Amino acid sequence: MSSMRGLVQFIADLRNARARELEEKRVNKELANIRQKFKGGSLNGYQKKKYVCKLLYVYIQGYDVDFGHLEAVNLVSSNKYSEKQIGYLAVTLFLHEEHELLHLVVNSIRKDLLDSNELNNCLALHAVANVGSREMGEALSMDVHRLLIS
């Protein structure tokens, strides 16, 4: 993954925070900025990837991330591997098996299961294994089976 200076700087800011309150203030400022960017629309794939990476970092630091999930789902359908990879990572962390957006990602997963690119196959299998709702299992079981025996 190419260096995302904004992400690197954000992580450095959080690590250098002297107190939990300062860290929370920085996180809240960044979340507000990301929310505003997503509402504005017109982001390219790189920008979406960068902001979703920041959301992932905030999430793994224990903060609640209640937005940006749709942008992660959209990254899954990207043609660029780095964007697709971040999209899949975010989907597997943000979406649980009962999440309302999960049905939106099923067709993208199917497309990647049927793709001739093995990296895309692996990303899709990983998502099925880690999110794997009943609906997803029913919709994708034949595609997974076909891939595993090929």
Image (cartoon, grey):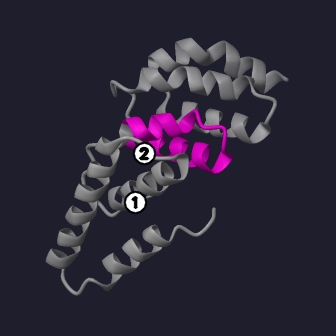
- SS at badge 1: helix
Magenta range: 70-94
Q: Which mark is residue 86?
A: none
Say left or right for 13 vs 148: left
Q: Crowding near pointer 2: few (<14 within 10 Å), some, many (20+)? A: some
Q: Is residue 34 above or below residue 110?
A: below
Q: Is residue 133 visible?
A: no
Quadrant where the N terminus is found in the figure = bottom right
Q: Residue furthest left?
A: 21
| Label of residue 93 in the image | 2
Image point 19% across, 69% down: which residue?
24
**Rendered-image quadrant of the C terminus:** top right
Q: Position of residue 8 (x, y in %)?
A: 46, 73
Quarter of the image where one finds residue 76: top right
User: In the image, what residue type sits under mark 2?
Assistant: Leu
Q: Secondary structure at mark 2?
A: helix
Q: Nearer the viewer, residue 60 or 10?
A: 10
Q: Tell me: residue 96, above or below residue 43.
A: above
Kindly identify which numbered label has been placed on residue 54.
1
The residue shown at (76%, 18%) is 146
